[in-house]
Image (cartoon, rainbow, N blue to C red):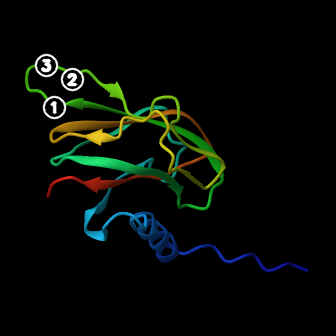
């Protein structure tokens, strides 16, 4: 006799959860809240360590939360650090850590968040390059990294 399997969460459920992360805390006007999102991994192989993504911020902002979400149904662990540097055409940028001693982590789960941001550099300047690196990972094939931000300019 077989037992029915628990239904797998749908992509729509996952996207609704991601949308909820972008909702402002009660003290912040909804129009000021946005997010910076990057996805690591190909969905078939374990995510490699090292630099996984870089994005340029074309606006000033303040980070108000960080989230990691695995959406393929695999439980695992990952440790993500974020650094920033001012973009320059005159040579390689010098990156400084944003996440300090409290990186974003998923620990034997499918979701992780950091809302206290202890020790983080919270301000993003116009022209900053954000670099997302995986320090360690087990089992996970694809992860969304989302930074909830408060835009300080359009």
Reading the image, the residue beneath label 3 is 91
Disc 2 vs disc 3: Cβ atoms closer than 8 Å? yes
Q: Residues within 10 Å of mark 2 (few under 14, many from 20)?
A: some
- Say what secondary structure mark 2 lies in: loop
Ranked by sequence position, the earlier of labels 1 and 2 is: 1
Residue 9 picture location, percent across and down = 59, 73
Q: Quadrant of the N terminus?
A: bottom right
The structure residue drawn at horizontal position 52% and vertical position 56%, both measured from the top left corner, is 69
Q: Nearer the viewer, residue 29 or 135?
A: 29
The image quarter in which residue 121 lies = top left
Disc 1 vs disc 3: Cβ atoms closer than 8 Å? no
| Residue 50 seen from this side | yes
Residue 22 picture location, percent across and down = 39, 64
The structure residue drawn at horizontal position 39% and vertical position 65%, both measured from the top left corner, is 24
> Mark number for residue 87?
1
Nearest-to-viewer mark from 1 and 3: 1
The structure residue drawn at horizontal position 62% and vertical position 43%, both measured from the top left corner, is 77
Residue 106 picture location, percent across and down = 59, 46
Q: Residue furthest left?
A: 89
Q: Quadrant of the C terminus?
A: bottom left
Q: Residues within 10 Å of mark 3 (few under 14, many from 20)?
A: few
> Mark number for residue 93?
2
- Say what secondary structure mark 3 lies in: loop
Q: Is 152 situated above or below 124?
A: below
Q: Is 39 situated above or below 52?
A: below
Q: Residue furthest right?
A: 1
């Amino acid at each position: 006799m077989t037992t029915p399997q628990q239904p797998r969460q749908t992509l729509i459920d996952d996207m609704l959860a991601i949308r909820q992360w972008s909702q402002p805390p009660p003290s912040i006007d909804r129009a000021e809240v946005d997010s910076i999102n990057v996805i690591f991994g190909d969905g078939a192989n374990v995510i490699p360590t090292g630099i996984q993504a870089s994005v340029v911020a074309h606006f000033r902002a303040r980070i108000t939360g960080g989230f990691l979400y695995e959406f393929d149904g695999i439980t695992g662990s990952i440790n993500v650090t974020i650094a920033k540097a001012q973009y320059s055409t005159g040579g390689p940028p010098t990156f400084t850590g944003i996440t300090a001693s409290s990186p974003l982590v998923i620990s034997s789960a499918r979701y992780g968040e950091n809302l206290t941001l202890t020790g983080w550099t919270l301000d993003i300047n116009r022209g900053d390059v954000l670099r997302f690196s995986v320090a360690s990972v087990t089992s996970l094939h694809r992860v969304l990294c989302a930074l909830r931000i408060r835009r300080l300019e359009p």
